[in-house]
Amino acid sequence: MASPTTANFGMTADRPSQSLKRRGGWIEAWVEGAIQAVAMLSIGAILLILFFVGKEALPVLTSAEVHREVTLGSMLAPIHQGGETSYVWQPVSELPKYNILPLVAGSLKVTIVALLFAVPLSVAAAVYVSEYAGARAREIIKPAIELLAGVPSVVVGFFALIVLASWVQSAFGTEHRLNALVAGIGLAFAICPIVFSVSEDALRAVPGSYREAALAMGSTRAQAVLRVALPAAAPGIAASVVLGFGRAVGETMIVVIASGNAALLDASLDRSTRTITATIAQELGEVVVGSPHYNVLFALGVMLFVATFVLNFAGEQIVYRMRRKLGTAV
């Protein structure tokens, strides 16, 4: 039987621990509430931005005054003038023309060029880091590539303007010094980190037992990577491409500086081009508020927002399903 002194000592010793537990519980609850509040505030800010942009774009559909200059049909249909058919973005003229197809084509051209350069390099780097590199090399290479995401896009744009444009013109003899090819290669620097990171995570999420089983059956290291690891990680790699596409479509400064900004509807990569983001960035600061031109630019913003949201959502869903399939989803 414990003495009163011993019992009192035990009760006294328990009180501080219970007090610390209660204090820790309050702190944990407060931190959790603060995180939830910040998350809800972020979602609310995004919804407010979308509401504002949508409100300014709505007159394109509802305003009779705007319809006298621009309609959804005129934004997509060719312009017939002087016996010729053309697609022209020329909002500042006696007869404004708001055809958006040259802008859509320009965005797609530079994005596809960027993916053609960035995806093979990034996936190859991800395969090396996850499958072949040692621990020391991995600690150096992975952060170095991911640090590219922290380089300001305006710096990449100036590099493309001053250095890359001269190299491309010397190597390919392009008609225009600033063109879709230069802008696309510059844009590749911006999307390499995201394609690399998601692809490398997808490869590392493949269970090691897959590789061990392939090696046990007599496969070489390269065969295990090419025929087992890569197919298993294919959904994640596909998601990295989708996310990279969304990142490239929404990029502004690189294409403003390096694309030449000529709204031409053609498939040529050696001629100047213009993207949706570059058009919004260059024209919105000088447009008359409330004019049809102003409303059309906001309509382009809504279209861009929806496109990037859908692409990013699709990429995240692919990544989640891949992790769930491999048993690594949280």
Image (spheres, rainbow, N blue to C red):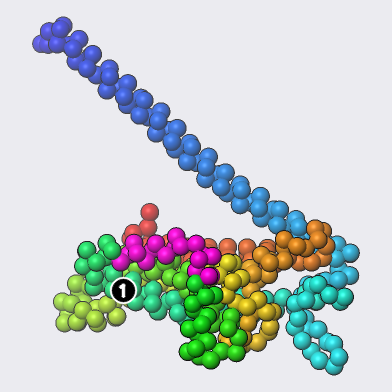
- Magenta-colored segment: predominant secondary structure: helix
Q: Position of residue 90 (x, y in %)?
A: 78, 76
Element carrying mark 1: helix
| Above or below, 21 relative to 168 | above
Residue 193, horizontal then vertical, whole percent: 42, 67
Classify the position of the N terminus by image quarter.
top left
Q: Place residue 330 in its image quadrant.
A: bottom left
Please give the count of numbered marks on the rendered protein. Answer: 1
| Residue 322 appears in the figure | no
> Residue tagged by mark 1?
127
Front position in the image: 145 or 324: 145
The residue depicted at 75 percent of the width and 62 percent of the height is 286
Q: Is residue 65 visible?
A: yes
Q: Is residue 286 above or below residue 100?
A: above
Residue bounds of the magenta highlight: 141-158
Q: Is residue 196 magenta?
A: no
Decide: is 94 above or below 282: below
View extreme (top): residue: 4
Question: Is residue 150 covered in magenta?
Answer: yes
Q: Bin the neighbour count of mark 1 within 10 Å (Cα to Cα): few under 14, some 14-19, many 20 and up.
A: many
Q: Residue furthest left?
A: 1
Please tell me in which quadrant of the rendered image residue 240 appears.
Answer: bottom left
Left or right of residue 132, residue 36 in this image: right
Left or right of 315 in this view: 267: right
Q: Percent x, y for residue 41?
A: 57, 44
Query: Three-letter amino acid code at disc 1?
Result: Val
The residue under the point 23% across, 13% down is 12
Q: Nearer the viewer, residue 46 or 86?
A: 86
Residue 204: percent from left, percent from top: 30, 66
Quadrant of the rendered image containing residue 86: bottom right
